[in-house]
Image (cartoon, grey):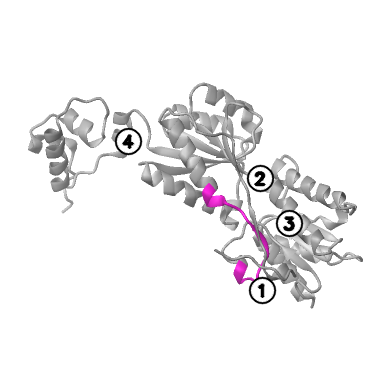
Amino acid sequence: MKKAQVTAQHVAQQAGVSPTTVSFVLNDVPGSTISEETKERVRQVARDLGYIPHVGARALARGRSNNIGLVLIQPHYQVFTDPYIPNIISGISEVTQLNGFRILVENINSSQRLSSIEDMLKGGEVAGVIAINMYEVETGITQLVKQGYPIVSLDVSTSSVISTVFIDHAHGARQVVQHLINLGHRRIACIPYGPLKGNPHVAWRLETYRQTLEEAGIPFDERLVRFGDFDPETGYRAMQSLLTETDRPTAVFGMNDMMAIGAMTAIHELGLEVPDDIAVVGYDDIRTARFAYPALTTMRAPERELGRRSANMVVDLIQGNSPNQTPVVLYSQLVIRNSCGATRALPDD
């Protein structure tokens, strides 16, 4: 026989108080004049009966949702193929759990865009939003922020009112290319993730790649650019194509580690050696990077820190406080392993 659900009415009857008092006590509603003795009695009765407050009721009592929305603006298959988004979520959850919030991950496609974020905030589904890839809806986000809605962007923004936390990936790309130049390479290929159109992240890194080469007196050669798509298979195919060039590259920069590892497989299958024939550098420093063969040189991106910083910022906004700093800019660290051919190495911790 199914056990009857314990309700706030049951707690109220046994504690000798009203259901409203139970709601105020168990939902920590501020401003009540309930004595500490009564609060403790209600809590003890709730524990004894095994009462669990309904999430929706708790949100109504507090006057806000206990959800923070992580909104991925555009179809984001990267979340299923690359640890970038999970790492950010891990950092966010460290903060949300400490502050009594939960994460609601929402993937918004091009047909939904701003209206979905607006509905989530105005409908009370979330107390605040952390947005990734919001560059196409920045004007609308700005208007929501001006209306008082707590929103934090993980992108560079031209708006002075949007609170932002982001990793300067262009700075990281420059370090990668400069490192390969310093090792003596002049035919440096690049495997960015695509498509380029409408994605400023890719455009910024590619432009940095081009500028760094030209500043070193190395002409940019578009034949050395092949687009991948986050996962190892596309890095593998891109590298296969690069290897058909008559004057093939001596080094390759994969814009994420997954594509770089795929590229190394293609190099090995042709009977070439990494790094003796072709040096390879990735980006992100995923957990498997140091266990690739050879161990992958890469940029260690502070993705979990990005999640933590953005979560702290949105919690501050939800609580009515202004962020101590915005924008917050984070930087990646070059981790030198065997795949680039350098003799110097940095620790993995």
Instruction: State the residue position of label 4.
Output: 56
Tell me residue 291's x, y (percent). 60, 71
- What SS does tag 1 mark? loop
Q: Which residue is the site of mark 2?
A: 168
Q: CA distance from mark 1 to mark 3?
A: 19 Å
In this orientation, which residue lies closer to the viewer: 98 or 141?
98
Asked whether 293 falls inside the magenta stretch, the response is yes
Q: Which amino acid type corresponds to the residue marked 2 in the rendered image?
A: Asp
Task: State the extent of the magenta-drawn residues as a range.
Answer: 290-305
Q: Position of residue 141 (x, y in %)?
A: 58, 29
Report the residue that reaches farthest toward the top. Answer: 147
Per the model, the C-alpha gap separating discs 1 and 4 is 51 Å
The quadrant of the picture occupied by the N terminus is bottom left
Among the two numbered marks 2 and 1 on one chain, the one whose residue lies closer to the N terminus: 2
Q: Which residue is mark 1?
A: 293
Label 3, on which residue?
176
Does the residue at mark 2 contact the one at mark 4 (Cβ under 8 Å)? Answer: no
Q: Work out whether mark 3 precedes mark 2 in sequence or the reverse, and give the earlier one.
A: 2
Residue found 32% across the figure and 35% down from its top: 56
Q: Quadrant of residue 65?
A: top left
Q: Amino acid at mark 4?
A: Gly
Question: Residue 8 appears at what percent x and percent y?
Answer: 18, 36
Query: Which quadrant: the C terminus?
Result: bottom right
Q: Amino acid at mark 1?
A: Tyr
Give the label, 3 or 4, closer to the camera: 3
**First along the sequence among labels 1 and 3:** 3
The residue at 37%/45% (across/down) is 98
User: In screen coordinates, is 61 left or right of 269?
Assistant: left
Q: Would you say the residues marked 1 and 4 are in contact, meaning their CB atoms lie under 8 Å apart? A: no
